[in-house]
């Protein structure tokens, strides 16, 4: 669950609750059209693109029943999840991409392993066990993928992982907050991407990395009053209203 602070059409403070699967779909949309020169198209597309689209499918059972962060009274976001529950969700996400082969499982598992290794819970018994388990699984999945084709390399697998992590972060940047300041993001091609908000959900991107003339995106969010919730039940009973978040990305003036 992404919890985004916003104001509604009546200028009242609200929380916008966004499903992780909706965010992952945005990351997949970014990846699918990527590759205008000088940017390189998605590697191993048959495995990598579905992995990007589905890397958060483990949240399917959790997001419809949001919970309250007991310390703040806010809806609990993916950033606030207890590590044991997050690891369970991640396991389901890794299992969800199995139909797209060992490379898909490898890059999703490596993505979550990096997140765990960089967190405060990395040294806990659960964190250590999670990292050890998926280190072994990743070695197996990578070897399984490499052995089936001599053109497959560890470098291509690393590039696929870099792409997943980049598109995940690019989507999160749009989904997590209303953006009003320019931002620069490093791409897997080592070419900086400049993002300039123009207002009303419109953004200028330089240099333009997609093989289409513009990118139009929309996702659904549930708006609920921004207040302290006393229990999970109170939060889950708050119906709120459904709103649509839209972004329009257009080419900027800077070329590479």
Image (cartoon, rainbow, N blue to C red):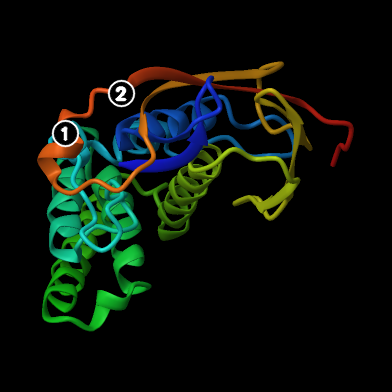
Which of 122/5 is in front?
5
Disc 2 designates what residue? 240
Residue 18 vs residue 86: left or right? right
Mark-to-mark CA distance, 1 and 2: 10 Å
The picture quadrant where one finds residue 81 is bottom left
Query: Looking at the image, can residue 232 be seen?
Result: yes
Q: Measured from the top left, where is residue 75 in percent x and y? A: 28, 46
Query: Looking at the image, can residue 49 be seen?
Result: no
Secondary structure under tag 2 reads loop
Decide: few, some or many residues near mark 2? Use Cα within 10 Å; few <14, some 14-19, many ≥20: some
Disc ID at residue 236: 1
The reply to whether callout 1 and callout 2 are in contact (CB within 8 Å) is: no
Q: Is residue 35 above or below residue 180?
A: above
Disc ID at residue 183: none
Q: Is residue 137 above or below residue 90?
A: below
Identify the residue shown where x is 26% and y is 63%. 71
Q: Measured from the top left, where is residue 126 in percent x and y? A: 12, 74
Decide: few, some or many residues near mark 1? Use Cα within 10 Å; few <14, some 14-19, many ≥20: some
């Amino acid at each position: 669950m992404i919890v985004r602070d916003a104001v509604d059409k009546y200028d009242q403070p609200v929380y916008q609750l966004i499903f992780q699967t909706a965010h992952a779909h945005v990351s997949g949309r970014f990846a699918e059209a990527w590759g205008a020169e000088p940017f390189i198209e998605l590697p191993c597309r048959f495995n990598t693109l579905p992995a990007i689209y589905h890397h958060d499918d483990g949240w399917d059972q959790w997001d419809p029943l949001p919970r309250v962060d007991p310390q703040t009274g806010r809806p609990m976001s993916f950033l606030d999840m207890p590590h044991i529950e997050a690891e369970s969700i991640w396991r389901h996400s890794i299992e969800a991409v199995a139909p797209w082969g060992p490379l898909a499982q490898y890059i999703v598992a490596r993505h979550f392993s990096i997140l765990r290794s960089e967190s405060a819970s990395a040294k806990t018994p659960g964190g250590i066990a999670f990292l050890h388990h998926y280190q072994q699984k990743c070695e197996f999945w990578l070897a399984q993928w490499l052995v089936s084709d001599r053109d497959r390399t560890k470098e291509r697998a690393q590039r696929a992982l870099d792409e997943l992590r980049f598109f995940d972060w690019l989507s999160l940047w749009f989904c997590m907050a209303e953006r009003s300041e320019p931002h620069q993001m490093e791409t897997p091609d080592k070419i900086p991407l400049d993002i300039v908000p123009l207002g009303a959900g419109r953004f200028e991107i330089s240099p333009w990395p997609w093989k289409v003339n513009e990118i139009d995106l929309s996702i659904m969010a549930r708006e609920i009053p921004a207040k302290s919730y006393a229990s999970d039940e109170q939060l889950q009973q708050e119906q709120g209203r459904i709103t649509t978040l839209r972004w329009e990305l257009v080419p900027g003036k800077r070329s590479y």
